[in-house]
Amino acid sequence: MAPDIGRLLRRGATSGAVVAAAVAALAASQAPEAIQPTTDNTGGDRAVGTGESAPPPGEGSATGDSSYYTELPPLNTPPKQPGTPGAGAGPLVVTGPAEAGIPATVLSAYKRAEQSIRSTAPGCNLPWQLLAGIGKVESGQASGGRVDANGTTFRPILGPALNGVGFANISDTDDGAYDGDRVHDRAVGPMQFIPSTWATWGQDANGDGKKDPNNIYDAAQAAGLYLCANDRNLALKADLDRAILSYNRSNEYLNTVLSWFEYYKRGTHQVPDGTGVLPIDRGDNRRPGVFPGPTTPAPSVPTSPSPTSPAPKPGTQNPKPSTPGTTKPTPDPTKPTPDPKPPVTSPAGKVAVLAVAGNRQLTAVTDSDFTGVPRAAALDASGKPVAKVSVRFEIVGSTDTRFAGGRTVVTATTTASGIASSPALRAGEETGSFTIRATVVGRTLAAADFAVSVTERQADTLVRVDGDPLSATTGTAFEQQLQVKATDKGTLAPGVLVTAEIVDSKTDPKPVTEGPTFKSTSSRTATFTTATDGTLTLKAGDLLAGDKAKTYFLKLTAPGGGTLFVELKVTAPTPTPEPEPSEPGTPGASPSPSASPSPSASAPTSSPSATASKTSTTASKA
């Protein structure tokens, strides 16, 4: 890739000239423009084709042109297997030539990568057999499938130091993090990525939270993405050749990979992990600075002094058959990369800085939409906008705020003005502050951060809607309904959390330890949420009077300053009068017995009265 750029950045070079030079160097070292999907890749965390794509010839490769296994497949064709060749389901099928066997986990990783990339970039037409061909040549299928249950090699697979002796000269770019070498880079893992390439294309395809070049799932996914860059269609021979040569700039490498690719296409079978056939011949004996080509191993051709020599014994050196043999391969392997045009830099590769373009600070109340969204600007070294750049927006921190669709990570593409905007953002029920971080997909540029906060819903005014006094006797419940309306800046305030508390005074409110309680909490405090119309209602029976007769107050408070006191009057019940006892012998002591004698007992009393009445009447007539 471009290790010099990393050194410039580590030295803190910030002048416009240096940044421009760095961007120019980056543009020269990176690949043609890649496809720009707007969502993350299935099974991985990078959109297909985003970021740096395949380096152009002469400027770099996925492997740093490290060594590889040069063995060719056997001439015999592997027999077709019943059903799907190499299927991962069912018992292991171990038939046919041993060279056609692929370890189970390794085969699963290749097929998973094909399925994942076909779902997001069907136009690439990536076949898993191509990954198998590269995996065979690069590492002998992860050293014969010596991987654990998660697909990680038992020991790191490392290529030779890329010190310019027989290979490319690539100084350390990862401080030895991947390859353990702090002087020069080395190709790493079953697909042999150099650290600088892995930094851009690394994947987490097995979902363990790590991008590990020594994991066959991660490495196969990354290799597939790398091969599909530049909007290639691998069903086309020219694009297929370009893809392979982008992996290692060697014509011999191209022919070797194609040989295994065709071999695997004719049929494969699955073998247990750790039992794959290990290739032997590895091309580590190259001359310094020489990258092998088809004509390199044929120095005997020029020994013939004359094309018309009649000598019979060097028949195999006859200039007529040998000349085409040495000259024909030369244009064929180079035909896939004759593009005279300068390499096209991907949009991501042009970006020198990602800046906040709008809404650096965003605020919303709980359970509501934010009025704005994060907006980031992708700019090149001269400050000009860069279009078609994939920008990732990620919610960082503890919050239930989400982008549209309930997502925490989204990808947007910059417009012609270089601006990328996230989808709509909605606050959840949790309050607090967090960050939304914008980054350029495929790059390690400084992020653009947005400060986001979610606050409680507020009400600056609480008023009582009904006016009936609230009163009750001790030991009963308040039978009147209480309804309160909450507003904020004159507008109804729904969803406001209102705190209710029983206090002893309006002027000096203090919590009480006796008196009314809330039925719902069996205590003297409670919280309520205003309805969609901004009202809060305590129904009859929701407040219990308690056992202490006194005047209390219900204090209601809301975020935003709204406060209301409602009087609660608790009275003692009216006592029932009881009859006082009378002394014996008093005239009124026995009214009941005189009122209820038997008829025979009352007759004598009635008779004199009636006689007296008659006598009086008679006298009056006389």
Image (spheres, grey):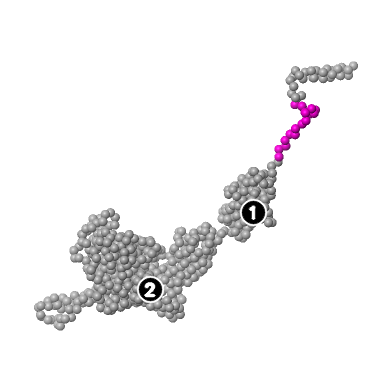
Residue 177's place in the image compared with 517, above or below, is below
Span shown in magenta: 575-592
Which x, y percent locates residue 604?
Answer: 79, 18
Residue 511 is labelled as 1
Is residue 581 in the magenta section?
yes
Nearest the camera: 429 or 519? Answer: 519
Q: Which amino acid does label 1 sit on?
A: Pro
Q: Residues within 10 Å of mark 1 (few under 14, many from 20)?
A: some
Is residue 124 in the magenta section?
no
Is residue 398 among what the camera can see?
A: yes
Which x, y percent locates residue 559?
Answer: 60, 59
Is residue 371 among what the camera can see?
A: no
Looking at the rendered image, the quarter that the N terminus falls into is bottom left
- Left or right of 14: which side holds 58? left
Residue at left offset 60%, top offset 57%:
558
Residue 175 is labelled as 2
